[in-house]
Amino acid sequence: MKKILLFALLAAATTIGAYAQKIGYVNTETILAKIPEYKAAQEEVDRVSKKWEKDLEDKYKAIEQMYSDYTAQEVLLPEDVRKQRQADIFKAEREAKEYRESKFGYSGELFQLQNTKVKPIQDKVFKAVETVARAKAVDMVYDKAGDVTWLYVNEKFNLTADVMAELGIRE
């Protein structure tokens, strides 16, 4: 009996605590789209990324051409020339993989470019979210722009305009 009573009290306390929480949400896509520095930074990252993607694509096309030429002439080539061509193809493939890793890898140049150009702006937005949440005594704030799908959201919890005001962004 004591266990049931203890469980009931614990359940009631948890339920009451859950109802006391204030939840808000923002749409960071909306906020970031209104920040000119973010647009410029993102455009620069995209431009550089596309250039590197094109360079990488060109490297792989050259490798394909080397391989195609090799297979077409393989039977006619002396052994030493065959081995040299194979080595050249493997070297080109290795260099292309190293290029891809240096540009697009976890610690690659694209990641570092995003860290220097985009992340400071995102951090500014997150700081503004925190400031607004504390001022409004909100316990949790969700980013509606992310993977979280909500079927219903009471508009009174939308803090997007408040965060934009905190950042000095006019609608």
Image: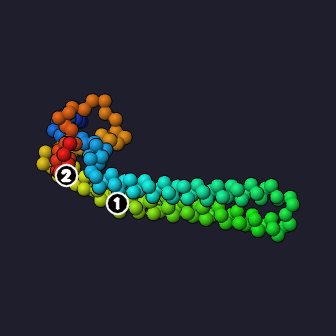
User: Which of the two discs, 1 and 2, labels the residue nearer the N terminus?
Assistant: 1
From the image, which quarter does the N terminus lie in?
A: top left
Q: CA distance from mark 1 to mark 2?
A: 18 Å
**Residue annotated with mark 1:** 117
The scheme the figure's colours follow is: rainbow
Residue shown at the point (64%, 55%) measured from the top left: 61
Query: Residue 167: which numbered mark, if any?
Result: 2
What x and y, as percent, mark residue 77?
Answer: 85, 63
Q: Is residue 7 visible?
A: yes
Q: Mark 1–mark 2 contact, CB under 8 Å?
A: no
Residue lying at 82% horizontally and 70% vertically, measured from the top left: 80
Describe the element under mark 2 as helix, strand or loop: loop
Q: Mark 1: few, some, or many residues within 10 Å (few <14, many ≥20)?
A: some
Q: Is the C terminus in the top left, top right, bottom left or bottom right quadrant?
A: top left
Q: Amino acid at mark 1?
A: Lys
| Residue drawn 21% across the image and 38% down it | 158
Q: Is residue 6 visible?
A: no
Q: Position of residue 101 (x, y in %)?
A: 53, 61
Percent coordinates x, y for residue 19 in the rendering: 18, 35
Q: Quadrant of residue 11?
A: top left
* Front-most of residues 37 and 148: 37
Tell me the amino acid under the disc marked 2: Leu
**Badge 2 local density, few (<14 within 10 Å), some, or many (20+)?**
some
Residue in front for this viewpoint, 148 or 37 = 37
157 relative position to 53: left or right: left
Query: In x, y percent, where is residue 160?
Result: 22, 42
Callout count: 2
Q: Residue at x 51, y 58 (%)?
A: 52
